[in-house]
Amino acid sequence: MKIALILTGSIAVLGAALPVFAALGDTVESVASDQKKFQARVKVTQSNGYSVHEMTADNGVAVNEYVSAAGKVFAVSWKGPVIPDLTQLLGSYFPEFQTSVRAGKVRNRRSAVVRNPDLVVESGGRMRDFSGRAYVNSLLPSGVGAEVIQ
């Protein structure tokens, strides 16, 4: 019984330490709740038709969440010493990403590049220096191209 309590407490502490970010297709409210929950430093930059919410977590991972004027997260990008939880970042798009990776639609072991009709994910790097981006073509605001997602 005592071991179960210790194990449960350890899992809860470890889970609380992991950064979680808004996912593709989520609303701007989810971005704000992430920033508050993880006390990440955040900087919001307004652009023509969208905003970029730049968050830096204590573990050094920087995540940019691109939010349309309609309030939807249409893209995310990341850079840091570890790859953030792609399950969380990609949200409902993660199964499509995972299926594409399993089908062998990747370049090599160091990178994963998925270019489906609606979902694009590019992730790569080396130990302690990872980066990537993901976006949904159908959610891109009018006049905004993929080149702005960095």
Image: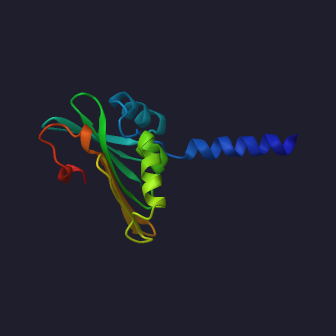
Tell me where residue 128 sits by quadrant.
Answer: bottom left
Judge left or right: residue 37 versus residue 145.
right
Colouring style: rainbow
Judge left or right: residue 137 versus residue 61.
left
Give x and y (percent) for residue 47: 15, 39
Is residue 48 visible to us here?
yes
Q: Quadrant of the N terminus?
A: top right
In this rendered view, identify the residue nearer to me: 74 or 125: 74
* Residue at 42% over, 70% down: 110
Tally of numbered discs: 0
Give x and y (percent) for residue 71: 28, 29
Give x and y (percent) for residue 93: 41, 43
In this rendered view, identify the residue nearer to me: 31 or 93: 93
Give x and y (percent) for residue 139: 26, 38
* Residue at 45% over, 50% down: 86
* Residue at 15% over, 43% down: 144
In this rendered view, identify the residue nearer to me: 26 or 54: 26
| 20 is higher (above) or lower (below) than 120 | above
* Residue at 86% over, 42% down: 2
Is residue 82 visible to us here?
no
| 138 is higher (above) or lower (below) than 127 | above
Q: Quadrant of the C terminus?
A: bottom left
Judge left or right: residue 66 versus residue 63.
left
Tell me where residue 44 sits by quadrant.
Answer: top left
